[in-house]
Each structure stands twice: as structure tokens, then as C-alpha cells.
Amino acid sequence: MLGVNNHGQKIVLACAFFSKETTKSFIWMFEEFKKAMPSGEPKTIITDQDAAMTRAISIAFLTTFHRLCRWHITSKFSVKLPHSAYKEYWLEFQKSIWDIDNKDEFDAKWNSVVTKAGLTDHPWLSSMFDLRESWVPAYARHFFASGMSSSQRGEGFHGFFKQYISRRNSLMDFIIRFERALSHQRQKELVADQVDAFEVAQCILPMPMNKQMATLYTRTMFQKFEQELIQSTACFLELKTKDASKVVYKVSERRNWETRVAEVIYVKDSDHASCSCKRFEFVGIICKHILALFRRDQIEYMLDKYILKRWKKTAKSGLVSDANGNEIKDSADPGLLINQSTMSQLASDVVEDALMCEEGCELLLKTLKSLGVKLKLLKDGPSNNEVGGSSSQTQYTKDPKRVRCNGGSKRVTGVKEKAMKRGIRHGQECVHIGHDRRQCPRNLNTSTSPLNNDESTPIDLSDPLFYKFYRMHGPTQ
């Protein structure tokens, strides 16, 4: 299970070995996860359409919003729909999914596209429409999810761990390598903490609110906020309705030669503004539409209720206690950052000294190569024999049986990608592209071209001029 820290970095929250991916196994994992997380159930969890996991989430996480991975669903359109319908109507499906914030408007647009495509009885489209509250933005953006809409972050994290582990590792070897990978991940988080502790991000816009958020947010989150603030300058407000309790504004934005419209509602009693795009609810950062309203009302500083502690530099400050009231300490080792700084300074000094003479450069290069080999052996970890030990009294832990996980299948490929994988045909006789053996001009039957009624001259198909003619006009009759 993966999550996101206050720097927007991917972090591992929990992991488990399964011999079978059953509902019972997932329930056990989720219950253990809740014991380890003092804040209780997560607000949102994103998965693929695994049936066993879906049932387990509905049992173990009663208050969690279960969201389906949008990428897994949209990537199946090219496979599930007829080729002609996909080619003609996919762009309209995209617009209905991504460009509409209102639920009723989405339903109307979706049904309109389905009807035009003649797919009203299509079983897969009908099932996806029934599940729309779990994956369509117009329905799902009102739940906080750190801006994530798919499980691709988790799948992309596989590449990181593959640098440390492989299928050939034993169980003990895997644990050692996995811990090493987590240490590397935690070190990146410590580096980001160090940068935010001693540096303040540079502001592009010299506005009081921008400078305020630069001191509060982590660098990554501040850059996202500043981007919204910059884009708010291109938004235009228009009063739509007004009464004693609320004011509704129509906010227009010109983007990619299209005008996008959002609706901002300001409630007077609670002094609260909300937007139809639901970016604040979904990402936790105020959107450009509300920022445009703040600029118009000349609000110089951001109100505390619009600043999520989740994205602040001080997000990890304070004590965290378990169910028994015991303090839970951070497992990250701050000594890693100190060691990195010390070794970097030492390495810089050694390089400066070595550059003074050629013999010093040769000595340092030779030493570094030897050291690199030793460090690689250290990184690869001990062998299975070293891990298990040589004493006859040592109790060995057997490796689990290898099983194929449900998520191990190949990803869905589209029609265009399949055509590209087939590649360009090469002639086996003449090694030219664009034809196969049957259509190769060198193997075509020699034809004749009558010059008069009595004789004819054979055509030399190997002539370069004829081959050029063939490439331009096709085979002669």
C-alpha cells in the first residue's frame, strides 16, 4: 500500500506476502494496517477492479471512499468497444469524462454519446456507467485523494524496487534488500525536509499571499499553489445570482482555444467559498477560480481554513500515539542525512587535492574503481548461505511458494499500439522495406512490353530505375 507525504513523494505505508489473493487475505491485511495507523481508516483508497479486494474494502474500511483506477478503465475503451465506434467517438467520451464537473451534465453527455454511437445495449459501457460514482471525476472529486485518480503511482513504484530486488532473491535476502530500498526512500524525504527547513522558495508573483504560502507549504506544494495563482489572472468573474444567503459567480477561463466555465459559490453566514471544480476538496490546494474571487475582493492573505496542514512544512510536527497512548517515533534515521553531508564534503576535498597533480588523479581513479567494486558487492547483499548461517543449530526459514499475482497480467494495448508492434515489413530477397517476399519486385514474373507485332523486349526487374518506379506507382500489370 502506497501513500503520499507532504512533499508529494510516494511512500510505502504497508506491504504483505500473499499465497492467495482472496477476500480473507485482504481483510487480514487491512485490519493489521488499521492497527499500525493511529489515525484510523484512510479517507480514500484507489485500486483496480479486483473483486476480492473490493469485497474486503467494503468490510474492513467502512468509512473509506473506494475509488477505481480511472486509467485502468479508460485504457479498456479501445479493447471493449468496436473499432469503428472507438475511432469515431473516443474523443467525445474523453470530453464527457474529463471536462464536465456537474453530475447531471455528465449523465446527459454520456447517454448522448452512447446513443449516437449505437451502443445503448453495450454490456461493458452499461456496467461502467453503473460504477460512475467510483471513477468519474464529476462524482468522485468531492473526496480528498491528494490529487491521485489512478493507481499508476503504485505501478510506477515497481521500477524503483526492481533496482534492489528480483525474483531470484530468497525470503531473507528479499527482506534485507527491501529494507535497503526503504532506507533510500526515507533519505529522499529527509533531504526534502532539510531543504524546506533552511530555504524558502522563490516567488514568481510578488504578492503577499504568494509569499505567505512560500513560508508555509513545502516546496512542491507551493509550486502547485503558485501555478493556480498565476492561472487565476486569466480568469474572469461574472455575477450570476445573489440573495441574502449566498452569491454565485460564473468564472470563465480561455484555455487551448476553448472557454472553460466554473461556478464559485460564496456562502455569507459561514464566510466560505467553494468551486464546482472541487480541486480544494480533491487535492487540498485552493483552485484558481476561488483565487480569482479573492483577487477581486482584494484579499491579501490566505485564510487558515483554506490551508491544509497535510501540505505544510510542519505536517509531521507533534506527537503521534498508538492505541495505548505510547508515542510512535519516526523510523527514518536522521543520521543518513548527516552522513551524506559529511561524505560529500570529504569527497569534494579529496577531488580538489587529487587535481593538483596527474599522479594524484591516477591514484584517486584507481582507488575509486576498487571502492566501487566493493560497494557493489556490499549493495548486492550476502549470499543465501551467509543469510542462513552455517551453524547446525540455526533454524532456517523456508522460502514461500511462488505464485502468480492477479495484477501480473500484461497491460491492455490499443489498436494503434498493436499495429506499431507488428513493425514495418522487410523484403527478404532485396532487404528493402514496404513489401514482403510475395510482393518483392525481384521475384515478380518477368513481363513483356510489346514494341511491335513481331518482337518484344524483356523488362529487367533488377534495374534501379524500375524499382524506383515500382515504389512510386506499384507493380506493373
Image (spheres, rainbow, N blue to C red):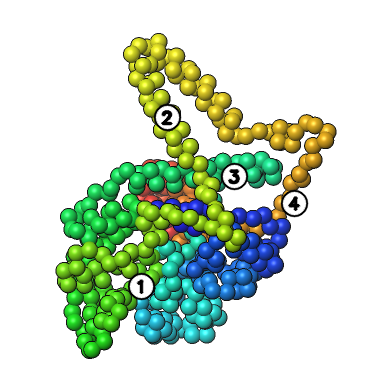
**Is the residue marked by circle 3 packed among few (<14), some (14-19), or many (20+) residues within 10 Å?**
some
Using the numbered discs, state the Cα–Cα distance from disc 1 to disc 3 in whole angstroms. 38 Å
- Seen as rendered, the residue at the extreme right is 392
User: Which of the two residues, 295 or 80, is positioned nearer the viewer here?
Assistant: 295
Q: Nearest to the eye among marks 2 and 1: give it.
A: 2
Q: Is residue 77 left or right of residue 18?
A: left
Q: Is residue 264 left or right of residue 105?
A: left
Q: Secondary structure at mark 3?
A: helix
Which circle's residue, 4 or 3, is located before the other in the chain? 3
Quadrant in which residue 255 is drawn: bottom left
Q: In this figure, which residue is indicated by the disc labeled 2? A: 342
> Please, what is the three-letter code of the amino acid marked with disc 1?
Lys
Q: In this figure, which residue is indicated by the disc labeled 3? A: 178
Using the numbered discs, state the Cα–Cα distance from disc 4 to disc 3 in whole angstroms. 19 Å
Query: Could you tell me which residue is drawn at 40 percent across and 10 percent down?
Result: 359
Q: In this figure, which residue is indicated by the disc labeled 1? A: 278
Q: Is residue 191 left or right of residue 63?
A: left
